[in-house]
């Protein structure tokens, strides 16, 4: 009997990572819990790309996306054991937002705008950290 590969084969699943399914460290960021989750992530990604279109080359975007996805998965795996499952691009989007703001801060002409953006993302993350936030991936 042929076994179908479903979306479950790609999400971050701690128990399956421990069985050697390492591809999940990257693939989990490219699947979503539902259509709303996907659309919100794609809207946020479009906004970040529009905001920083002149800040990074496409090759840099690719490296940032892959590295931030892998780092975030490793942090979840190593330091946040209560997270058993994870899907979505939100963490990567936040990393891109911060990376772009840091690049702007490094440019004397864009420094003030970069600082404002860093303050805004920090405020957003702090308010989410102290509040309930929105979770579409909890089980």
Image (spheres, grey):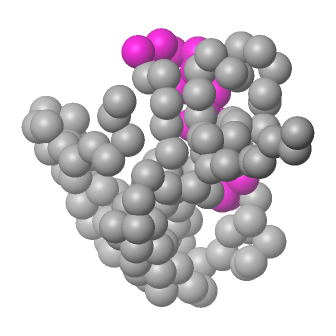
Q: Is residue 58 above or below residue 19?
A: below
- 25 and 136: which one is in front? 136
Determine if residue 67 is in view.
no
What x and y, as percent, mark residue 47? 41, 80
Determine if residue 66 is in view.
yes
Q: Is residue 11 left or right of residue 125?
A: right
Q: Quadrant of residue 20?
A: top right
What x and y, as percent, mark residue 9? 69, 40
Q: Quadrant of the C terminus?
A: top left
What x and y, as percent, mark residue 119? 26, 56
Q: At x 67% / y 57%, what residue is drawn?
A: 64
Q: Quadrant of the N terminus?
A: top right
- 127 and 42: which one is in front? 42
Q: How many marks?
A: 0
Q: Is residue 29 left or right of residue 32?
A: right
Q: At x 77% / y 15%, what residue is drawn?
A: 19
Range shown magenta: 64-82
Q: Is residue 89 left or right of residue 61?
A: left
Q: Is residue 75 magenta?
A: yes
Q: Quadrant of residue 71?
A: top right
Q: Is residue 34 magenta?
A: no
Q: Is residue 13 above or below residue 43?
A: above
Q: At x 21% / y 35%, what residue is drawn?
A: 129
Q: Is residue 9 above or below residue 74?
A: below
The secondary structure that dominates the magenta segment is helix
What x and y, as percent, mark residue 8? 61, 41
Pick out the residue farthest to the left: 131
Pick out the residue farthest to the front: 1
- 135 and 114: which one is in front? 135
- 5 and 129: which one is in front? 5
């Amino acid at each position: 009997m042929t076994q179908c590969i479903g979306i479950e084969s790609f999400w971050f699943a701690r128990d399956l990572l421990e069985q050697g399914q390492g591809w999940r460290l990257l693939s989990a960021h490219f699947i979503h819990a539902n259509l709303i989750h996907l659309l919100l992530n794609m809207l946020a990604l479009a906004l970040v790309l529009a905001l920083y279109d002149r800040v990074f080359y496409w090759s840099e975007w690719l490296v940032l996306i892959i590295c931030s996805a892998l780092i975030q998965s490793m942090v979840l795996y190593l330091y946040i054991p209560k997270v058993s499952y994870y899907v979505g691009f939100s963490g990567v989007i936040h990393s891109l937002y911060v990376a772009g703001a840091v690049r702007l801060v490094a440019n004397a002409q864009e420094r003030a705008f970069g600082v404002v953006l860093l303050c805004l993302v920090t405020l957003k993350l702090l308010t989410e950290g102290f509040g309930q936030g929105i979770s579409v991936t909890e089980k």
